[in-house]
Amino acid sequence: MIDSKTSTYCLLGSPISKSLSPHIHNTNFKYNDINAVYLSFDVKCLKSAVIGIKELGIKGFNITIPYKEDILKYLDEIDPLAKKIGAINTVKNVGGKLIGFNTDGLGFLESFKDKGIELKDKNILIIGSGGASRAISFALAGIDVKSITITNRNKDKALNLIEDIKKNYNHTNLYFIKKENIKDRYDIVINTTPIGMFPNTYDKPISTSIFSKKTIIYDIIYKPKETLFLRQAKEEGKLTINGLDMLLNQAILSEKIWMSENLKIYPFIFK
């Protein structure tokens, strides 16, 4: 029941029409008997949206494409890890003070733990250098992977990300590579770009035929559940992972920031 005491949480981004976040959060609120509702807003002006959130007393929100980095300038306080990453996906409103966090990286790591896959000493290729890439790269650098290689159309942006990681972690080998120079030398390949996301499902960031059957192919996109990138890899006999596990894990971590560490997690099954 929605009443005068119902707390409001939301997602800000564009596009957001296919987001599963409202389903995840509203289901988990009900499962934990929490009087709250989670909505999604397709935002064209982030500054105006943030002003509205403060005025309306919305207690927390998530940030998705394309605002994970832009939101930084509208926050009153930033969690130390999120400050290192330089991207935000979770914000808590504490009496009008907006505090930014990043649960993407930890949610990403949890998706491997759930599958019993060891990441230590792995050579990893990351496609993209946006907000999600930053969170994932920092998370991987913090757990002793052997190397992280970043490929991106904007070389300067990729090199800036590499330099930011080096300032905080000096034990991981970091490289930039042009897409045309990619070869079969990676244990895990991760797409962090929106290439292949609905409605542009006919596209893929690179060909997976470059890599051996032992290479794990990960796409953080979850709409569609199986992108062209993953479908090609699956047909080649490779292990594939989509973005649903990461989405769920980062969402639950967001709720724990907003509310309580003692939340129960609904046993989600995504068809």
Image (tube, helix red, strand yellow):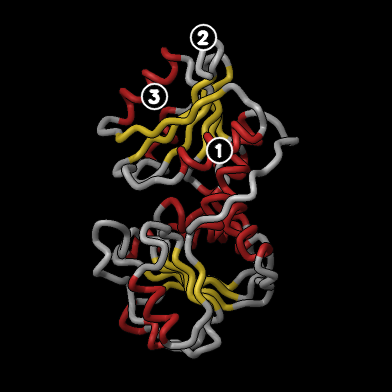
Q: Is residue 29 left or right of residue 227?
A: right
Q: CA distance from mark 3 to mark 1?
A: 25 Å
Nearer-N-terminus badge (1/2): 2
Q: Residue at x 47, y 37 (%)?
A: 62
Which dot marks residue 50?
Answer: 3
Q: Is residue 190 visible?
A: yes
Q: Amino acid at mark 1?
A: Thr
Crowd rating for badge 2 (residues with CA inside 10 Å; few <14, some 14–19, many 20+): few
Relative image position of residue 175 (x, y in whole percent): 48, 73
- Quadrant assignment, res 72: top left
Residue of label 2: 4
Nearer-N-terminus badge (3/1): 1
Q: Residue furthest right?
A: 262
Q: Amino acid at mark 2?
A: Ser
Q: CA distance from mark 2 to mark 3?
A: 22 Å
Give 37 or 99, whichever is nearer the viewer: 37
Give 120 or 56, whichever is nearer the viewer: 56
